Structures are given as structure tokens and as C-alpha cells.
Amino acid sequence: MSAPLLVAEGLHRSFGETAALVDAALRIDEGEVVAVLGSSGSGKSTLLHCLAGIVRPDRGRVVFDGQDLVTMSDARRSALRREAFGFVFQFGQLVPELTCLENVALPLRLARVPRREAEQRAGQWLERLEVTDVAGKRPGEVSGGQGQRVAVARALVTRPRVIFADEPTGALDSLNGERVMRLLTEAARDSGAAVVLVTHEARVAAYSDREIVVRDGRTRNLEVAA
Amino acid sequence: MSIGQTFLGLLEATPRHGYDIKRRYDEHFGHSRPVAYGQVYATLSRLLRGGLVEVEAVEPGEGPDRKRYAITEAGVADVAQWLARPEQPEPYLQSILYTKVVLALLTGREAAELLDVQRAEHLRLMRELTRRKRGGDLAEQLICDHALFHLEADLRWLELTTARLDDLAARVRA
């Protein structure tokens, strides 16, 4: 078996008196789409934030491609998030002052890619996500479904190795949600990126290869259990 | 599925041979369960006896004679009545899953485990249907969506029941 891309072991994280994660663990292989399921407050978003190096666990290890995110310096972790990870949240979190094309090009510009090249690559991703027509519009001028597909394009533009998607269809109707999930998983599979998909919707989770359930901060890998 | 009325609906557009009715039926509604030839001819015989269809023509062929069936006025009225009548929604009040959960609690077994395993099984089928939907035409997508929404409803129930297991355990063991 090849080394997993991302491994978490013995994760504990509390917020005040509330234990959000209790001995949580999971492994994700290259190119896998893994759904993290659980009810509100189960700890699934905290798990995603720990895996992505956004939140530091109180205890435990998060190892990405052989590097421990927990002991890594803040600067190195930020750089890793920019270079190797992509993010899609429930509400696209696009920069309202920039056009959709500029939003998608932004991670490349931050990585010092020249504007022309960055915008050319951004345009290709907008086309892949079927939103070429909104390239020149600002996020406030596009529909929720279009905005979310722009956010997916932005997450993929740096060719990350892992995409973290936190309730990516939570604000969309069924039809738009389906379209975002189809395009997100197809584009991720084509580019070889793994996807960590946090959701409470079973129809969204059905786009994954397998699921992990979080309950009261504890993880449960059902395929192993079954 | 009411095969008789579905056949009548297919015949209302135009008279057809038994083979053609089967082909049309399988194309539109057969998906995972095409209708058997035996059932096609048994259904047509029943409709004939009921005066809902008639044999419009008999064409000699190399094998047995081929009958072309046409819908009668009574058949048109029957299919109209069937389409206008709402289907009885399934009340889902007899749940094998609920029975299993209660029995697990009564016998001191892990009810949460049972619910988790069931969730995994539901998701396995939902993945299969999602893959099938991706490669399918609009008809296939709608059929799969219908199944997916029902499975999702089951999963929501599993989630809610998991959250209420302690209360349920106290109740059934009282």
C-alpha cells in the first residue's frame, strides 16, 4: 500500500469546556474523494480545519505528504495551504471588488504568477466549470450556483493536491447543488486532487468514494466497520 | 406499476403489435426491470377480455400470425381515470429499521452500530445511483433522482434516530 497523502491520528481539540474532537483519526489517499458526515456540532468542520492546517489541534498529528502540520511553523503552514490546498466553503467567499476571472486568478497572483498567464489559466478553469459567461462580472452580479462554481475554479486553479470543501452546496437548491458536485468531483478527479468533503447531505456525500462519520467529536470509518 | 394501464397509455397514441408494446415499455419504464414476453401477452389477453383493447388486424408472418392491438373507448376512459386519480402516498408506518432498532435496544445490542452499518449500506447504493445518473439520459437521471431522494429520507431518519437513541432506550426498557 502506498503512503497516504494525508493522515490524522489521535486528534483532540476543545473550545473552552467543549470537546470538538476526541481522538479523531483518518487517512486520505491521493485522488480520493472522502465525505466527512455528521450532524451540526458533531465536530466535522473542526476536523476539516485541523486537516487543512487552519486550526491547530490540542493533541495529535496531521501529516500531509510526510510533513507534520502541527509542528510546522505558521509561515510554512500558510505557504503549504496556498500551494497544496484548495478551499471551497458554503458561501463562495469570493472577493466582492474583483471580477470572477480576477477571483479565480488571485491564488496564482499571490504565488507571483504574471497577470496575463494567471488570467489565462483562470479562464481555462472558468470554462471547465461552465461559467465562462460570468468572467467579467463581480460576485454580487452572479447567481449562487455560478458563484459557487467560480469558487471551485479558484480552488482548483493552483492544481492543489487536496481540496477541502465545507458544505459546498449548503446554500444551493438541488439542481445547482448537483451541478456543483458533478463539476467539482469530475474536475478534481481529472487533475488528480483528493477531496475532503464535509457535508450533512447524503446526496452530496454520494459523490464521494467513501465516507467517514463524525459523532461527538469521534471519527468512524464505516467501510472498515462494515 | 400498473402494467395494464401503462399498456393502454402506450396504445392510445397508436395501435401496436405485442412486440412493439414491449419495446416501448422497456424503453420508457423498463430501466432495471424489462417486462417479460409472457407478461406482455397475458396482460393483453386480460385487456382484451375486459373490452379495453381490441385486435385491429391480424397479419400473417413466417411464424405465428401477428396481432395488432388498438385501444377501445372504454380503454381510453380507463386510462384517463387512472391518470387523474392521485396515487396513495406510502405512509411508511411499518418500518423494518425501526423494529430492528427497538429489538437491538431490548436485547442489549449496539443499536448505534446497527444504524451506522445501515447508513453505510444506504450510501453504497446512493453512490451507485449517482454514478448511473452521471452516465444516463434525462429519463435515467429522473428515475435515479426519485430513488436518491427516498434513500436520503431514510438516511435523515437514521440520523435523527441515532440522536434520539438514549431516549428511545429509556422508553423501550421502561
Image (cartoon, helix red, strand yellow):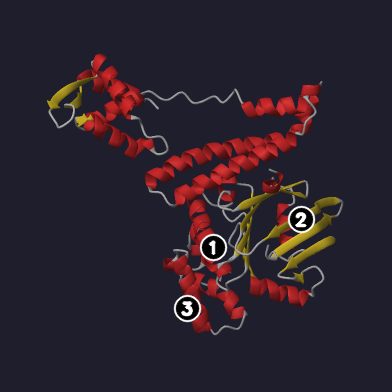
Q: Quadrant of the C terminus of chain B?
A: top right
On the image, the x and y values in percent for residue A126 come to 47, 68
- Do tags 2 and 3 sit on the same chain? yes
Specify which label sits upstream in the sequence, 3 or 1. 3
Q: Which mark is residue A120?
A: 3
Specify which label sits upstream in the sequence, 2 or 3. 2
Q: Nearer the viewer, residue B42 or A129?
A: B42
Asked if residue A226 is positioned above or below residue A209 in the image, the reply reads: above
Residue that carries the numbered disc 1 in the rendered image: A189
On the image, the x and y values in percent for residue B134 come to 45, 52
Q: Which mark is residue A25?
A: 2
On the image, the x and y values in percent for residue A129 come to 47, 64
Asked if residue B55 is positioned above or below residue A82 in the image, the reply reads: above
Q: Nearer the viewer, residue A59 or A104?
A: A59
Mark 2 and mark 3: Cα distance apart in space: 39 Å
| Residue B163 showing in the rendered view | no
Q: Which mark is residue A18?
A: none
Q: Chain of mark 1?
A: A
Q: Residues within 10 Å of mark 2 (few under 14, many from 20)?
A: many
Name the residue located 54 percent from the left edge and 68 percent from the top edge.
A191
